[in-house]
Amino acid sequence: MNAPEEDLRQQFRALRADDARRAPSFESTLARNSASSSVSSPSHSTVRARRDQRSRLLWQLGLGTAVAAITLVATQYRPDLSTSQQRQQQQLASHDLPAVQTWTTPSDALLADASTSDPLETSAHLIGEIDRLLNRTPRHL
Amino acid sequence: VSYNTALPDDRSGTNQPVPENADNLPASDLRRLLAELHPECWGWTLRCCRGHTHTAEDVLHMSYQKILSGRAHFSGRSSFKTWLFGVIRLTALDQRRWSVRRWLRFLPLPDDEPALATTGDFPGESFFQAEQNQALRDALARLASRQAEVLHLVFYHDLTLDEAASVMRVSPGTARTHYERGKASLRSLLVSQNPVQ
């Protein structure tokens, strides 16, 4: 055993001697009432009753606070209930489609074409729209 | 029952014999063995109860009751002291669980008492020694539980690492790891508490 370990051992031995001085006797330990019976000892019943009441009150306070906090959070929270499909429809309605629906002649469509950025996509779209408008065109025209 | 084998804890000065056939150990012999080991049991129980004397007395009482009533049975597979320390440790764990259950059900708990403090209680005890003891207690309280347990068993009760592992119900390798780490942590804690040393 090296010296530092022996030093630790000495400290523990001093602690052991100290504990041994305070140790209750074997007979008194054997004769001691168990924990469960000492709990119900009448000598401290008033103090314990007060302590129980206090801890119960603390529990109830804590529980009440937690319930109130959860309720508050739940009432304040307003989730966005619109679905993704609804959002898509809203975007379409506010963006391109109104302009498309206002076309009445092929020249309107051609004018709109000038403001778009993607020529291929717009051309295909325009061809479709022109066809639709031509089909709608009254017979006398 | 004949007793012709010494317990492996002769270093601690107890020198009590261990029964050859422990299964047939009469209550009177058990009682004598317990009485001889009582001071050491007290130290170990205090450690298991984190220095709370009233709880330690309850736990020690219950452990003795378990043994004398036959509910805890010594089969002779380990030394009597090792087995006894294991019984005390498990009883202390049971007691802790019992306290938690009572607390959760708003039932009254045993009287709380402060952890053992030593300074100036005994006239013959030097103030310096009392301070050192308290510093060691504080340092042990700050260690991880397993580390403190293994150091206590090895240094306080002079058990070997294998015996300590048996009490703690861990493998010897695990006990050695806790021992080495605990020793290093304890040294640094003691130095930080008293840098002059």
Image (cartoon, grey):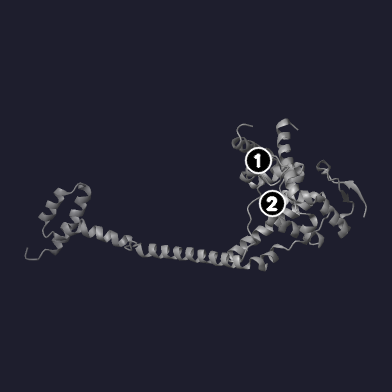
Q: Nearer the viewer, residue A134 or B182?
A: B182
The x and y percentages for residue A81 are 33, 63
Foreground mark, 1 or 2, reads 1
Q: Secondary structure at mark 1?
A: helix
Q: Secondary structure at mark 2?
A: helix
* Chain where mark 2 sits: B
A56 to the left or right of A11: left
Q: Determine the residue positioned at 82% across, 53% down.
A: B35
B135 to the left or right of B77: left
Q: Amino acid at mark 2?
A: Cys
Q: Which residue matches tag 1?
A: B131
Q: Amino acid at mark 1?
A: Glu
Q: Determine the residue positioned at 72% across, 63% down.
A: A34
The x and y percentages for residue A23 are 75, 51
Asked whether residue B25 appears in the rendered view, the answer is: no
The x and y percentages for residue A20 are 75, 47
Q: Nearer the viewer, residue A92 or A17?
A: A17
Q: Which residue matches tag 2?
A: B48
Give the residue at the far right of this rendering: B2
* Chain where mark 1 sits: B
The x and y percentages for residue B17 are 88, 48
A65 to the left or right of B162: left
